[in-house]
Image: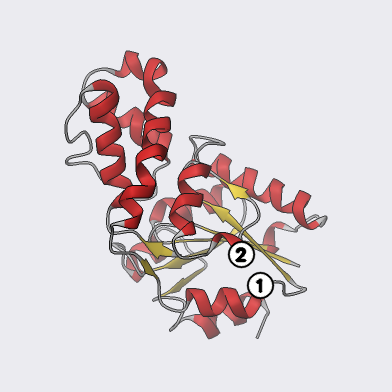
Amino acid sequence: MKLLLFDIDGTLITTGGAGMRALNRAFCQVVGIVNALDGMRLHGKTDPAIIREVFTVRGNAHQLGDFLQEILEMYVTILPEEVQRSEYTILPGILQFLEDFHGHSKLTFGLATGNVERGARIKLDRGNLNRFFPFGGFGSDAESRTELIRRAAENGIQHAGVLFHPDNVFVIGDTPRDIVAGREAGFQTVGVAAGDYSIQDLEEAGADLVLADFKRGREAFLQMTGLS
């Protein structure tokens, strides 16, 4: 059996910046920092790591422990509104692939995302995608992306009742951080160049396979995973 662990933003969906807007609003409401994320690149970072970086950049790193949970609580309170009013897209080929292979006897789907779990579920809810992902590893499990991927694999074992060989675990994401973390965790990695990073970027990060997107790269992915 194969375990497929999907990133969310830029891999399954795009939310038109809903997460950034919600986190900016949360920072403003909780600690009074306006446009806290201006100039920051968020791609592939966990939510706690992003908040830590803001405090570090703004010179208030010593306050992180006081406000981390409060900011995250405010963020997930604001996020549904931002997701609903954003330009929301399920990326090419994703829905068809999930519908075709959900419940397949040789596959288990999970998440490996830097979003805290409540944020992840809010983002997926608009596209009715939570039904495909009964478990995962999240930014609320670990600030380190490598560690949350390991947590996702452990949860996959518990869910499926199968001990997956590392060669049968596939970490799927759109950023070099997804690829590097997946490799550090000891798993196969698949880059999806549907976002801000190119095929070359993901290849240079060490991806075992890079797809333009799941529509154009479906057959290559099925061959890699032995499903074709």
Left/right placement of residue 207 relative to residue 41 reads right
Mark 2: which amino acid? Phe
Residue at 22% across / 19% down in the picture?
A: 59
Which mark, residue 160? none
* Figure check: 36 above or below 163: above
Q: Is residue 162 left or right of residue 180?
A: right
Query: 34 and 188: which one is in front?
Result: 34
Task: Count neighbours of disc 2 (C-alpha within 10 A) and say few if under 14, some if 14 to 19, many if 20 or more.
Answer: some
Q: Give neighbour class at mark 1: few <14, some 14-19, many 20+ (Cα, 10 Å).
A: some
Q: Which residue is mark 2?
A: 132
- From the viewer's side, name the closer residue of 201 and 44: 44
Please state which amino acid type lies under the numbered disc 1: His
Residue 81 in view (yes/no)? yes
| Res 85 quadrant in image | bottom left
Residue at position x 40%, y 71% in the image: 91
Q: How far is the residue under mark 1 from the one under mark 2?
A: 7 Å
Task: Say which element carries label 1.
Answer: loop
Against 17, is 67 above or below?
above
Position in image of residue 45 (x %, y %)? 39, 43
Q: Position of residue 105 (x, y in %)?
A: 77, 73
Which residue lies under the disc numbered 1?
102
Q: Residue visible at 83% across and 55% down?
A: 161
Secondary structure beneath dot 2 equals helix
**How far across and how far down the image is residue 151, in percent?**
64, 43
56 to the left or right of 148: left
Callout 1 touching callout 2 (CB < 8 Å): yes
In percent of width and height, residue 222 lies at: 60, 80
- The residue at the point 46 percent across, 50 percent down is 122
